[in-house]
């Protein structure tokens, strides 16, 4: 078969961007102040995240790749033949490649991504690498209900692939809601293949979010650079710093942007006051034991049919099916 044309279906139904000022103003009125973590991912932020994945302290990506290296053949066997693979996000080319290499006669691969550029790049790369796999790219926000493209032939099952522990960036209630939405999209016979970081000692986790080279700190503060550029706010970068600590009671990294002095910042028509050492919450990265993850899945009407970990036991990938359904 010949190389597929790079067709991207646009299903981006986000409200217009002029709402951004309102989103930021609302977040800065909250007590404590908070901003949504999706604001990290402008072009620079996405590049910085890729750089984070290369840092020696950030074990997550390396561990998940090691896991896929050992288990992707077995995972493909579990998913079975004639799968339609829907990936939430498309920035995980290495892991996706490892999976597609082993999948048996996949019906199609559907990357769902909100940023057009990474979507176009990964689609082209996969088209070249896997000319026999139809790629049906979907430009959309995966946290919203999706209108999946009609597959080129009937799949035996739809599997939603959500690698990279991004589920950990959602608070427990939102994570359960997202899993429930996926459950609807995968259908009765489908499944969810999902990565999640495992709980482990505090020092290892905290080091991953406070790398020595300062890449994570730059990633965090880039959110303010983005806001200054996109909404004309006047955050003075020298007056803020990154802080990430592990809340072992709750099992999550909590990342803040901390004001280093008393100061005021203009956001739209408002002046926002920051006290010295005031912390603005910008990201949670939840860590799950397998039992925690089973409980989360249960809240969405799902159960763990299979689980895999990397050789060091740092990271897990789960295959979830409808609770009560026979596994694949
Ligand atoms: C995308 N996500 C899984 C990363 C994480 O580990 O929570 C984002 C990140 N934030 C700081 N470092 C990496």
Image (tube, rainbow, N blue to C red):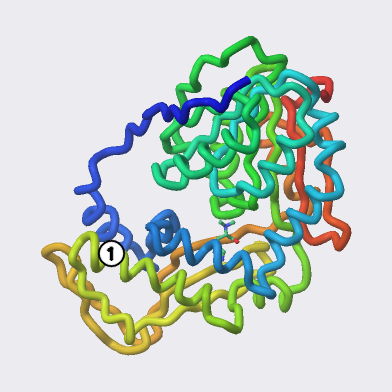
The residue lying toward the viewer, choosing from 142 and 179, is 142
Q: Is residue 322 left or right of residue 14?
A: right
Quadrant (top left, top right, bottom left, bottom right) of the N terminus? top right
Q: Residue furthest front?
A: 2
Residue found 44% across the figure and 65% down from its top: 282
Disc 1 element:
helix
Q: Is residue 20 left or right of residue 256?
A: left
The residue lying toward the viewer, choosing from 104 and 143, is 104
- Relative image position of residue 115 (x, y in whole percent): 41, 45
Residue found 64% across the figure and 10% down from its top: 154
- Relative image position of residue 321 (x, y in whole percent): 74, 28
Instruction: Judge whether 282 appears above or below 167 on screen.
Output: below
- Image quarter for ligand 1 equals bottom right
Residue 205 in view (yes/no)? yes
Quadrant (top left, top right, bottom left, bottom right) of the C terminus? top right
- Relative image position of residue 162 (x, y in whole percent): 63, 41
Q: Which residue is mark 1?
A: 227
Residue found 55% across the figure and 62% down from its top: 50
Where is residue 27, by image quadrant?
Answer: bottom left
Crowding near the residue tagged with mark 1, few <14, some 14–19, many ≥20 C-alpha atoms within 10 Å: some
Instruction: Judge whether 117 appears above or below 268 on screen.
Output: above
The residue at label 1 has a CB less than 8 Å from ligand 1: no
Where is residue 181, by image quadrant?
Answer: top right
Count of numbered marks: 1
Q: Is residue 14 left or right of residue 118?
A: left
Instruction: Judge whether 22 appears above or below 130 on screen.
Output: below
- Relative image position of residue 53 (x, y in whole percent): 61, 64
């Amino acid at each position: 078969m010949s190389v597929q044309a790079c067709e991207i279906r646009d299903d981006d139904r986000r409200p217009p961007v002029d709402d951004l000022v309102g989103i930021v103003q609302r977040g800065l009125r909250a007590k404590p102040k908070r901003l949504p973590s999706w604001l990290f991912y402008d072009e620079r932020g996405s590049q910085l995240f890729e750089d984070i994945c290369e840092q020696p302290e950030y074990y997550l990506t390396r561990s998940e790749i090691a896991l896929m290296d050992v288990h992707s053949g077995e995972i493909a066997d579990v998913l079975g033949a004639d799968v339609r693979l829907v990936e939430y996000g498309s920035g995980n080319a290495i892991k996706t490649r490892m999976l597609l290499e082993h999948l048996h006669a996949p019906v199609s691969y559907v990357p769902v991504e909100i940023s057009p550029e990474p979507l176009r790049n990964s689609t082209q790369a996969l088209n070249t690498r896997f000319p026999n796999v139809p790629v049906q790219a979907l430009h959309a926000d995966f946290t919203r209900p999706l209108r999946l493209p009609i597959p080129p032939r009937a799949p035996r099952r739809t599997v939603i692939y959500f690698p990279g522990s991004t589920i950990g960036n959602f608070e427990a209630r939102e994570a359960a809601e997202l899993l429930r939405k996926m459950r609807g999209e995968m259908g009765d016979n489908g499944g969810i293949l999902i990565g999640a970081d495992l709980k482990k000692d505090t020092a290892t986790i905290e080091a991953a979010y406070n790398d020595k080279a300062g890449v994570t700190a730059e990633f965090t503060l880039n959110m303010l650079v983005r806001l200054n550029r996109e909404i004309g706010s006047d955050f003075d970068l020298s007056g803020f710093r990154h802080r990430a600590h592990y809340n072992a009671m709750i099992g999550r990294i909590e990342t803040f942007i901390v004001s280093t002095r008393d100061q005021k910042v203009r956001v739209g028509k408002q002046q926002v006051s920051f006290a010295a050492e005031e912390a603005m919450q910008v990201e949670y990265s939840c860590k799950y034991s397998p039992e925690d993850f089973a409980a989360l899945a249960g809240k969405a009407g799902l159960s763990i049919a299979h689980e895999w970990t990397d050789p060091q036991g740092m990271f897990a990938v789960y295959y979830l099916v409808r609770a009560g359904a026979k596994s694949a």
